[in-house]
DNA sequence: GGCAGAGAGGAAATGGTTTTCGCATGACGG
DNA sequence: CCGTCATGCGAAAACCATTTCCTCTCTGCC
């Protein structure tokens, strides 16, 4: 038991030498045969490939990268916990990288700077080709401290260093889409219920809501946005506040789907019909909220999966020596459901009579 | 522009030879100095370490693992999408492995067998030390096809092969905990509203609910479990069905938190007080549901993060040559909130008078 | 028949680290 | 003063795949 500690260790894996011996050629020839390089007789090539397959030969990535200098590996660091926002980003990135034969090292720093440094060191020792940094908020973050330069792309939460590459959702456009949609469906007294003012996402969306309304000659119902927390409880409370401040309010644009769902409940319980009397819009397109709400929620999809995918592609470009710079936004889209009273199959503009 | 394609490539990283040259010793000595091995004069050791630090030397993991045969790397494959259930497992695993200096390759097969094989091949080329397989359901799955044997641990969804190691949540115990809690708080007419009968999680929980009730001389309100979908909509509907089938029903045990939340809404809208008239229990302890429900939900926490952590530890043991076998359960716990009428700070048993 | 050229495949170096073995130096005892 | 031993460190092999020469053989042509 203690004598053979590696008893359970797998049998020695087959190397290129094993294949070479079995095929009666040299290791170099095997390499050429498998990678389709060099000048080989077709029959030799086929024979070697057949032997390799028979033996289940799989080239050792470590040996390979030792030679090529590339590992076809990237690190994906989430600075906060992996959560509802970083997960789609992560999946999009993983998807795009996987298609490019690149594997992803997952690192969750849980908001801990020490842990972050630890992961960075570990990733650099592994000679990753690049790094994607994401988080759960859209607020800018200080750039990663890297002892060795390596291509980095920031996704969701941009770097404060303008020299870095960052990809962020287009919250300005999101707010604008919502306001335009509400105005187009005849709403005029629009309230904005949202999260804490110290969250960039809340302030950006609020600002652009106000701006878009101003451009249409309108202004916010209640005069100013209602800041609170990102919860249903606040949504319920804020809806009542908004109703009280302006009993004629005919739309509520909420900073996220939870607030919107809370508002939906509060409105229903106050006897206001959604969408007939009050239209309701959320943000995030979080299906469990948007689909479960009564009525289902019109909301903004930030395109986070697409953002992750774009981050991966940008990173691969940077790895291939075409670095970008600055903050790029990724388009979002409005998902229309029942809470704004437009039949889900119909186009945004009112149907021809 | 086209002439220097690798212009953006990072400067050559410092190797052990660079350190050796700068410190005036051989590479072997540097290795010993850094890894605290071999016989070296303390001053030599310190000098080498100082130079290494000065030059920012980071050992090349590929070269290292080429020699040691270990990569300190494991693969984490999710057979379905990464989702609400596999994510905590993944985080727990990542946490435990990270503490053991092991990095995690993330692979999301999105339920695609082709993709799965592709990932397996890629991971084996990278000579991972082990593999964790997870999914979003607790139903057994066929074992991974591995051309080369490598330690594998199945988490959440067990392998159909009893030779494999699988870790699963203890749904039997979960159901039992709920029934005991409901009985202990004076409920007798307990209905069970749950997901589709072709989901193992639904049937196991239902079976053990029935069994636990039988052991206490009780039986299910309505006579049998109400199977439907895992949604709030079904929860609302099922609650009405259960009320209709047995107007004196005094508790509803739901197969997940969404159903429970739906039931909470339906009960409130039917004028039944929760928990005074009807107690309500969910399953999963999904915070956004359990905390947002009115009242907040008593529910079962499957301990998925702990399950992930345990899977990682089990895998590390297997890698170190102490393989396990069979299906192991991970304990769950009851989280008592307002929907069962026990003050949240109080212990399970009724407080002493 | 001899030579040039092309084609096929082998030998060896490369990459970075670890580890074993052995050499050299210095100290100490006989 | 010489032999022995311990100590400190270097040289080289090993890990595995790739790639660059380089050699050998065969064919074709003069």
Image (cartoon, coloured by chain):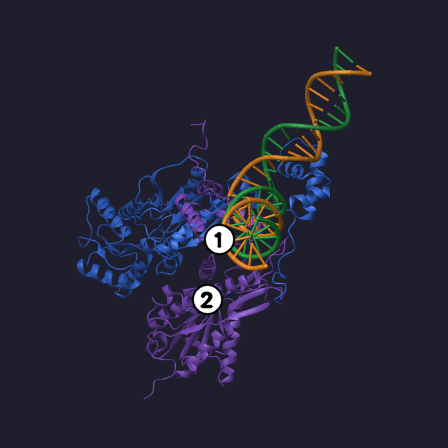
Chain colours: A blue, B purple, C orange, D green
Instruction: Report x, y in % for residue B113.
Output: 58, 52
Identify the residue position indicated by label 2 in the image.
B306
Q: Is A28 displayed left or right of A84 in the figure?
A: right
- Front-lying residue, B166 or B12: B12
SS of the residue under disc 2: helix
Above or below, B160 against A69 in this view is below
Q: Residue A345: x percent and y percent?
A: 40, 49
| One can see residue B105 in this view | no
Please state if A276 lies on the left or on the right of B8 as rendered. left
Instruction: Identify the mark nearer the N-term, 2 or 1.
Output: 1
Residue at label 1?
Answer: B35
Is residue A299 visible to us here?
Answer: yes
Q: How many residues crowd around disc 1 within 10 Å: few (fewer than 14), some, or many (20 or more)?
A: few
Name the quarter where the N terminus of chain A is drawn. bottom right
**In front: mark 2 or mark 1?**
1
| B17 up-or-down from B281: above or below | above
Disc 2 sits on a residue from what chain?
Answer: B
Q: Where is residue B146 in the image (x, y as percent from the top left)?
A: 62, 54
The single residue placed furthest to the bottom in the displayed view is B353
Could you tell me residue B178's position as x and y percent? 44, 77
Q: Which of A348 and B314 is in front in this view?
A: B314
- Check the image and report above or below for A244 versus A17: below
Disc 2: CA contacts within 10 A as few (<14), some (14-19) or many (>=20): many
Secondary structure found at label 1: helix
Q: How far apart are marks 2 and 1 (CA)?
A: 33 Å
Residue drawn where x is 73% and y is 40% of the image: A24
Q: Residue at x 45, y 77 (%)?
A: B177
Quadrant of the rendered image containing residue A261:
bottom left
User: B79 or B20, which is in the foreground?
Assistant: B20
The subunit letter for the residue under badge 1 reads B
């Amino acid at each position: 038991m203690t004598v053979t500690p590696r008893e359970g260790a797998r049998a020695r894996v087959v190397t290129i030498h094993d294949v070479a011996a079995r095929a009666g050629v040299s290791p170099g020839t095997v390499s050429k045969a498998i990678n389709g390089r060099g000048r080989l007789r077709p029959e030799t090539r086929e024979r070697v490939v057949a032997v390799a397959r028979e033996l289940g030969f799989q080239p050792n990535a470590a040996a390979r990268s030792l030679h090529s200098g590339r590992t076809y590996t990237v690190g994906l660091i989430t600075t906060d916990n992996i959560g509802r926002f970083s997960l789609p980003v992560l999946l999009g990135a993983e998807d795009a990288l996987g298609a490019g034969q690149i594997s992803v090292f997952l690192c969750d720093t849980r908001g801990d700077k020490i842990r972050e440094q630890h992961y960075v060191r570990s990733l650099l020792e592994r000679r990753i080709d690049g790094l994607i940094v994401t988080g759960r908020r859209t607020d800018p973050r200080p750039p990663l401290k890297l002892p060795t330069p390596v291509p980095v792309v920031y996704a969701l939460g941009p770097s404060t260093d303008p020299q870095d590459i960052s990809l962020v959702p287009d919250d300005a456009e999101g707010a604008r889409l919502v306001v335009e949609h509400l105005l187009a469906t005849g709403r005029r007294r629009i309230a904005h219920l949202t999260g804490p003012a110290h969250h960039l996402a809340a302030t950006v969306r609020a600002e652009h809501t106000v701006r878009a309304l101003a451009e249409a000659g309108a202004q916010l119902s209640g005069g100013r946005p209602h800041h609170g927390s990102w919860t249903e409880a606040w949504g319920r409370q804020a809806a009542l506040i908004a109703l009280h401040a302006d009993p004629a309010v005919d739309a509520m644009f909420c900073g996220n789907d939870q607030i919107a769902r809370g508002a939906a409940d509060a409105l229903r319980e106050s006897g206001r019909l959604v969408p007939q009397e009050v239209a309701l819009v959320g943000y995030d397109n979080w299906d469990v909220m948007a689909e479960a709400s009564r009525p289902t929620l019109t909301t903004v999809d930030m395109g986070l999966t697409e953002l992750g995918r774009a981050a991966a592609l940008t990173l691969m470009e940077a790895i291939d020596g075409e670095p970008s710079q600055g903050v790029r936004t990724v388009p979002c889209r409005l998902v229309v459901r029942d809470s704004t009273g437009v039949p889900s199959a119909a186009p945004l503009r009112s149907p021809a009579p």
